[in-house]
Image (cartoon, helix red, strand yellow):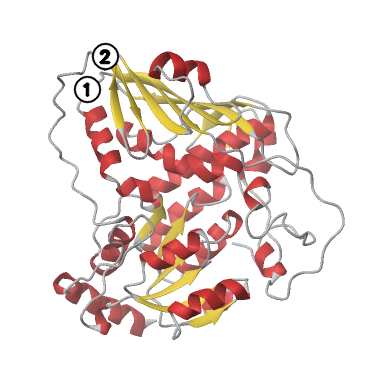
Amino acid sequence: MSKRFSRRGFLKRTSATAAAMPVVGYFGASAATASNSPNEKLNIACIGVSNRGRANVKGVAGENVVAVCDVDDNYLADVAMHFPKADKYYDFRKLFERTDLDAVVVSTADHQHAPATLMAMRRGLHVYCEKPLTHSVSEARLVARVASETKVATQMGTQIHASDNYRRVVELIQSGAIGTVREVHVWVGKGWGGGERPEGSDPVPSNLRWDLWLGAAPERPYVTGRYHPGQWRRWWDFGGGTLGDMACHVMDLPFWALGLRHPVRVRAEGPAVHPETCPLGLKVLYEFERPGEPNLKLHWYDGDQLPHEMAKRELGVEETPGLGLLFVGDDGKLFADYQKRVLLPKEKFADYQPPDQVIPKSAGHHLEWIQACKTGSPTTCNFDYSGALTETVLLGNVAFRTGKTLEWDAANLKAVGCPEADQYLRRDYRDGWEM
């Protein structure tokens, strides 16, 4: 351990003068640095290396990727072609027996985010973790607390946060372009949900370690095509539906622009609650109290619950965009998505001059974190910020599954007068995966 920390001290002293060479990441921007001196690079382990994980591996490829971990031989074989010197692991618990690591990238299915992240931070390792930060509300609070205690560099994988468009939207809202914002509407047209738990089982493919894929989740038989690799988001045991998949990306913008933290009230509506699978469409209303300002209502819609009438009325469109946000202020409205922003009504803002750009251009979402690991510089989606965002997002699923309006006591992590919410705020872990 002392060897690793003394090495980090060297990294901090030398990284400021390192000559950087860009590595193209998932979004096409420079995502990591490659120093002239190998001693100035971080030793990084990547847990989960395909799909979203593959993009994250690319994002840190300029550093020393010394270990890769996945439960699937095929995925490991693919990444090994690019990092032939990296040691390969199936079980990330074994990976943490190493003493030469500086940082870890976690890109597993949601139900394994917290176990891997906590193991890393408790060993003094910096962590980049995909969104949502955790699978349950209580895990998000625990992860944020441990990050604060260990003082490691952290970043949640909300890559759009690094875009220039999001920065300009934040400046418009915070400069008062549309006045006091009282409502925000957020929607995503995906529908991760539906279906019944399959009966029976299939032989586990020889390339897959099914028990390790289940990890902390309850044991169940393997069934071809129903969980791994692409369908796990539909199931409560592993994911959180469309809300869990996308809300950290899209709700990130109002959280940032309006300085949100914890809601005081959450209610949700959708189809009948299924004990196994997430809904194909969901509406959630989050209410926030803001000292000195009116309460804010944040509306979420997904799947088959998109706000078609509102979009037609406010945006003047016949077909609702598949993803978007509408800020409603006293003096106007602002529509945004990942790439664009539009002040409404257009005629009112025809001659509007935007405020000066005060939020600096991002070095890149992965690079922000790498620089923080080396120098202690801040990250914009650290686990304090992204922990609160994740808690809020996941509370929508808790409200839906209880069928009740949650009066949320954030300080005590409790839904007041709703004891049935406890089973969804927390979860049990299989033996060997306790946190």
Identify the image quadrant of residue 371.
Answer: bottom left
Quadrant location, the N terminus: bottom left
Q: Position of residue 146 (x, y in %)?
A: 44, 58
Residue at the image position 53 percent from the left and 78 percent from the top = 95
Local crowd at mark 2 within 10 Å, few (<14), some, or many (≥20)?
some
Reading the image, the residue beneath label 1 is 177
Asked if residue 91 is positioned above or below residue 221 in the image, the reply reads below
User: Which amino acid, by three-letter code, is at mark 1?
Assistant: Ala
Q: Nearer the viewer, residue 212 or 97?
A: 212
Q: Residues within 10 Å of mark 1 (few under 14, many from 20)?
A: many
**Residue 222 visible somewhere in the drawing:** yes
The residue pinned by badge 2 equals: 331
Q: Residue furthest front?
A: 318
- Quadrant location of the C terminus? bottom right
Tell which of 418 and 379 is nearer to you.
Answer: 379
Q: Are marks 1 and 2 in contact (CB under 8 Å)?
A: yes
Q: Is residue 140 left or right of residue 12?
A: right
Indicate the position of residue 298 as horizontal and vertical percent values. Answer: 45, 26
